[in-house]
Amino acid sequence: MLPFDASAALTIQTQPAFGTDAELAAVHKQLLLLDPTGARFAAVLRDTIDQLLNGEVTGRYDWETLFKTERTHAGTLVEINLQREFRFDDGEAMDYRIAGIEVDCKYSQRFGGWMIPPEAMGHLCLLVWADDYKSRWSAGIFRVREEWLNRGGNRDSKLTVKAQHRNQIAWLWRDAELPENVLLHMDPLDREAVFASKSGQQRLNELFRRAQARRLGRNVIRTVAQQKDYMKRVRGNGGARSALRPEGILIMGDYDSHRSVAAQLSVPVPGEGEFVSVRVAEVPATTAARPAVVLDDRCWAVATPDDGPCVAPELPKHTK
């Protein structure tokens, strides 16, 4: 599961206007108990988008490159993956039972585009939105009422929530941060350089050169390497870690010892299954100008453009 920085991005409506809807309040409360920060929800959405892109096989990283049939399947995958993550009971009339209450689940990549079937009338819906280009997502609970819906004009007579009545959605998380799709948001010239080589190893090396101080999850690594032994291509003994060390670049993984180094250097700390690369330079041990870490009995800080090339130190031994 990918990590999530809730403090930087999460907006939670803690006192929604439930009115007299006790069922809505109960479902809302249960979901916040299961996921107080939204980290699990965000990870499911990130993983589902990555599942659709299937970068290890296709090399894709952009939602727009999905086939129409794949985009149509996204809602079903979100419903399935949320149920797997939270172990919701099956519903009888709707998708789930949450806190013993029937709840349907509807996902849209376009905010407000949730397609609600006529059979959901009167029931609760978990409305989910995620946009990989904006790196944002939202989820809320909505009681389906005819007066709050646009009439269906499509073949299946599905309904949408009127814009003026979206205030009836009891938001769990609103406009929260979606874990970044690094390849999608890279500078196009950097991305072109990453994919220029036919060698998976060389592509990974270039990724770590070009995407420094950014969390790179396993899906990014898989998409760039397009090899089943992609993790081997990151580590030392011939992987990117040993290949880039002569250039002064450290590649920290999700080990506690590596996380400590990242924290002391004041760069993003790798979460589970993540890597962070950064070029370092040796600095005087007495300096207080830059965050620094002691490795190989020397003091190191994040390199600036003025710092010349050097061989990076060895990272500490792996410990979880």
Image (tube, grey):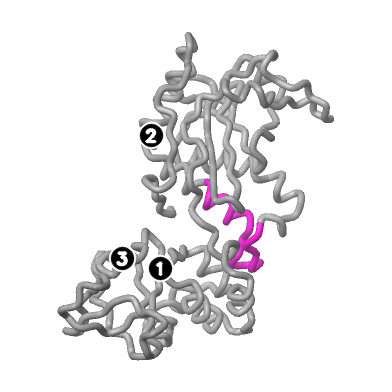
Q: Which residues are magenta?
A: 45-62
Q: Position of residue 242 (x, y in %)?
A: 38, 86
Q: What secondary structure is found at the residue carrying circle 1? A: strand
* Amino acid carrying mark 2 in the image: Leu
> Dot 3, crowdedness within 10 Å: few (<14), some or many (≥20)?
some
State the CA–CA distance, disc 2 to disc 1: 28 Å
Q: Position of residue 54 (x, y in %)?
A: 61, 60
Residue 56 within the segment the image draws in magenta: yes
Q: Which mark is residue 266?
A: 3
- The residue drawn where x is 75% and y is 26% is 158
- The residue drawn where x is 71% and y is 27% is 160
Residue 285 seen: yes
Q: What secondary structure is found at the residue carrying circle 3? A: loop
Q: Position of residue 51 (x, y in %)?
A: 58, 55
Residue 159 within the segment the image draws in magenta: no
Kindly identify which residue carries mark 1. 275
Q: In the picture, residue 239 is in which quadrant?
A: bottom left
Kindly identify which residue carries mark 2. 34
- The residue drawn where x is 67% and y is 26% is 163
- The residue drawn where x is 58% and y is 18% is 143
State the CA–CA distance, disc 3 to disc 2: 31 Å
Q: What secondary structure is found at the residue carrying circle 2? A: helix
Residue 237 seen: no
Total number of numbered labels?
3
Mark sitting earlier along the chain (3/2): 2
Mark sitting earlier along the chain (1/3): 3
